[in-house]
Amino acid sequence: MKKAITFLFLAFSAFAPLAAQTVYFGPKGLVGDPSSALAELLPYAAPDAALKLADETVLYLGGGAYSVTRILVNKGTDTLRFNDVLKVRDLFDATHYTIPCVNYNGNDFDGGATIADGVKLGKVKVPTGLSCEGSPWVFSYQRTGVPSCTLTENASTGLALFAANDSEASLVSSCSLEQEPDGRFVHVIVRPVVEAPYCYESKGVFGPRTEDRITLAPGKSFIATSYVCVCPPKWENYAVVPLMEHALRLLDPQLDICLDDDTVWSLAQTYIRSLFCLYEGQWLMATNRKQRLFHAQHKVLISREEMAERQKWEYWTDIATFNPSFEIGWAGQNFLNARMLAVQAFATGDEGLLEKAEGVFAAFISSQQKNGLLHTRYDQNFEKDHLKTIPADVCNLGWGAAEAVRMYNLLKEHGIEKPEYVAFARKVCDFFLSKWNDADGFGKTWWMNGKPAQTSGTIGGFLIPALNELYLVTGEAKYLAAAEKASDFYFTRDVDRFICTAGAIDCNCIDKETSYPFLQGSLQLYAITGDKKYLERAEKAAAYFSSWMFFFDPVYGPETDFAQYGWHVTGGTAVSAEHQCIDAWGGIMPADLYELAALTGNPMWERIARLMWANAVQGITTRVGEFFHGMQRPIGAQNEGFFQARFTKYRPVIEAGYWNDIFVSWPNSYRLWTLDRLHQKGIRLR
């Protein structure tokens, strides 16, 4: 370890008032001159006269990182109940802030009303800004990917404060970020957990504040450590890159991969086949297997009291493909699933499986209109007035067009010509090329008559991989030019500002998954053009996506699902500012992150890839007789949502550390695609 510089409050006894001396954090060690400092540790303020600061030790750990260890002693005769508050004040003019997984520079995005599966949910409120009704937002460490982390930055300087994970006392905490009248920010850690002025407990639902307190008997001590880290941004608005480097070093997240690659592949193949339904004469894969209760839960259309009553009855809790829908991309991934089945069919010689896979493509392609649009759920073709009332989204159509070209390439490798797949992708992409708008890019959703329905969001980035795939197979320069133009537009407007929005479709907010096509698409553009700006953009997209990852395990009680089933938060990725829970989206990342690590020489990306993968293969049903929530789930099934904080739509009680009971197809398709890509390069994750 590098030589540490230590500052101790030694000038006072346990009963004496604190010395007025202030601790100043410099870029490479503690400094005495505030003019050369980046931040200051604000003096401790005791909540009770009997509570004394016995010691506060600041250690320089090297590389711009500091630890702050505080020891409090109850010198009174009564047991004390209190909150410990630690504050660090910026001494630079920050222009941007992040609370990882929770607040991205204020969550300032208004995409209009949310419409999910035909249900109009209106404008869903999420925590925005730094305060609510005049009080600072305070968020539990269970919500933040780095525990109780706040990050502020400008073009050249960044600073983060977060809780250590060396003990439960250090870790169990909350964070807040306060802006003073002069514009300077104060980073705050509160111990233990407080959520205020409201607890964001469900989609658009602000519940009552929660508050735990430290209980300290007479003569007893409370000891907790926090980290202050200097984070000069790698690019403007990207101080999260050094923050992640600090988190990997100081928190040292570890999670073993619990299933080998072959087992993951077999389980995924089993599950996606279980989703096959014969619908209107076509074999298609249902988006999920779920309970009858799910729809009302997912759309927040039911009270918690009614939910508790319905959960008593098997009718509502049976798991099956009730009212199946068949989606081309996004959550349903019919095209990607079908392509992965084709990979299996060629490996095993299963002609029947290949025929079913081709049938999935044929069904959707046959429903495409002359203008290139199609309903992104095949079942929507059979709804009343569907051409007038149901729009198509760019996310699904981007997935569909890209997968059509990939399936064309796969079949061609085995001597099967399917030119209609390329024609399908061409018609999709040509539609969007004709509709490009310098204000909105490719827009968000479109009516079947070719008119825009919604325009806001970064969702148009899902067309970039499709355009790249189409260019590679046709050689037509217009598709490459369109991909480059879209990359320039969406990076300049959104990704460079460290936001991606509205790509999760049912979460009309700042989110995680919308960044993925910018990682994949940028790597493709770099391979095609050799222009290093695309490699930089790939790193930015990876950094943004990874800012939603958890670098630690919170503490959960033995009654929780996480404890009972041995599920770890580490490596999980939060969904969005609106859905503050974890899903298995990280399962798609390793192939791209391994490539990024090789191209940049930065091993951080490979380490993050393995953590995401280790998280994404947990909780998969591996055998008959393995029960979760007292239910025998289908083999290969995995929950869509893991609720690491006090946020859920699927339980009558708001508690942290639980799973829901919906089993979607996309986690399996993502894992299959990852393994297929890595195994082609001779790389095994386990």
Image (cartoon, rainbow, N blue to C red):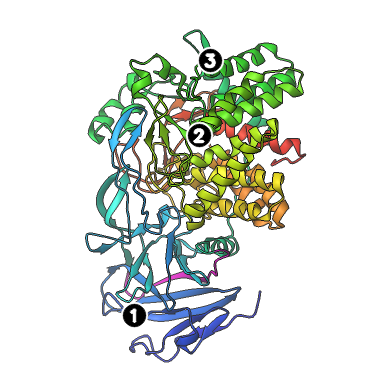
Label 3 environment density (alpha carbons within 10 Å; few <14, some 14–19, many ≥20): few
Q: Which residue is disc 3 drawn over?
A: 366
Is-magenta flag for residue 228?
Answer: yes
**Alpha carbons under labels 2 and 3: distance apart:** 22 Å
Q: Residue at x 39, y 61 (%)?
A: 173
Question: What segment is highlighted magenta in the picture?
Answer: 217-235
Looking at the picture, tell me which residue is in the foreground, 407 or 507.
407
Answer with mark 1 or mark 2, whichever residue precedes in sequence: 1
Residue named by callout 1: 52
Judge by depth and name the residue closer to the eye, 142 or 124: 124
- Residue at 29 percent across and 32 percent down: it is 120
What secondary structure is found at the residue carrying circle 3? helix
Classify residue 471 by image quadrant. top right
- Is residue 443 a member of the stretch shown in magenta? no
Q: Residue at x 53, y 38 (%)?
A: 462
Task: Point out the frontmost of discs 2 and 3.
Answer: 2
Residue 628 visible in the displayed image: yes
Q: Which mark is residue 180?
A: none
Residue where numbered disc 2 is placed: 434
**Residue 107: x, y in percent?**
37, 54
The amino acid beneath tag 1 is Lys
Judge whether residue 271 can be spotted in this image.
no
Amino acid on which the number 2 mark rests in the picture: Ser
Q: Which badge, 2 or 3, comes first in the chain's sequence? A: 3
